[in-house]
Image (spheres, rainbow, N blue to C red):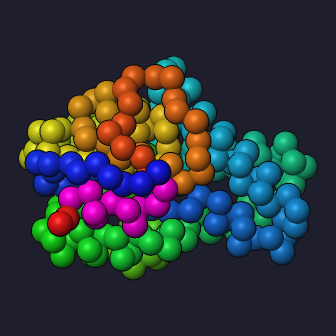
Amino acid sequence: MGATLKLYGVEACVFDAYGTLFDVDSAARAAQDSLAEKWQPLAELWRAKQLQYTWLRGLAGHYADFWQVTGDALDFALSTLHLEDAELRARLMNLYLALEAYPEVPGTLRRLKADGMKLAVLSNGTPAMLAAATANAGVAGLFDAVLSVEEVKVYKPHPSVYGLACERLGMAPAHICFLSSNGWDAYSAKAFGFHVVWCNRFGQAPERIPETPDAQIATLAELPDMFLA
């Protein structure tokens, strides 16, 4: 997945957080001493249920913030894998506040920032969750805006979420490049009107929803060359 496409007229890069900047598996991975061989099944089920609950709550009109959704999803995963334990739950939730950034993230952001690109985060996460994650990764000071769905009380892929980036940055969608490792998010952001680069870290198959992202890359390290000479 070579980054051969050049995108013109882009003045801001807006990043999804979880799975794109931050490794959502790293919380369970850090608790392997307690989870043993179940750490990866837990990580996968926790993430899948977390996303399902955002979509189901959105459709039903039963909004709860992402911290609660994350905890509810963890409870489901722990119960399913017969791992119910209050101390383990508390440990995993605390680890979620300190997710590891993918290795290329700090350098990529600094390179884009140095060239004058505006940078923002647009995430399902709560402001507190995003503040903790960006601070832990040492990248908090690089962003011009950190945007949470808390402002609109509905989750991605609702168009009002993507609209937050246009409102806060004062830009039309055509001047914004959106980055996500989640295929459903990348496709939906393209349908909203952004330029979109899908950071397809795990070689996922194309989605069957509107509309196709402009390009795919394997890691965010490939991104700056799409804008910089």
Q: Is residue 122 magenta?
A: no
Give coordinates of residue 225: x percent, y percent. Answer: 28, 63
Give coordinates of residue 27: x percent, y percent. Answer: 65, 65
Query: In the figure, is residue 206 to the left or right of 166?
Result: right
Count of numbered labels shown in the rendering = 0
Indicate whether 92 appears above or below 216: below
As rendered, which of 157 and 67 lies closer to the eye? 157
Residue 75 seen in the current view? no
The residue lying at 36 percent from left, 37 percent from top is 213
The residue lying at 36 percent from left, 54 percent from top is 3
Quadrant in the picture for the C terminus: bottom left
As rendered, which of 7 and 14 lies closer to the eye? 7
Magenta span main SS: helix
Query: What segment is highlighted magenta in the picture?
Result: 218-227
Query: In the figure, is residue 213 to the left or right of 7?
Result: right
Q: Is residue 222 magenta?
A: yes
Quadrant of res 95: bottom right
As rendered, which of 83 and 198 lies closer to the eye? 198
Quadrant of res 114: bottom left
Give coordinates of residue 171: x percent, y percent. Answer: 10, 44
Give coordinates of residue 220: x percent, y percent. Answer: 41, 62
The residue lying at 59 percent from left, 41 percent from top is 204
Query: In the figure, is residue 85 to the left or right of 140?
Result: right
Indicate whether 135 appears above or below 70: below
Query: In the figure, is residue 197 to the left or right of 100?
Result: left
Indicate whether 92 appears above or below 169: below
As rendered, which of 178 and 30 lies closer to the eye? 178
The residue lying at 36 percent from left, 76 percent from top is 107
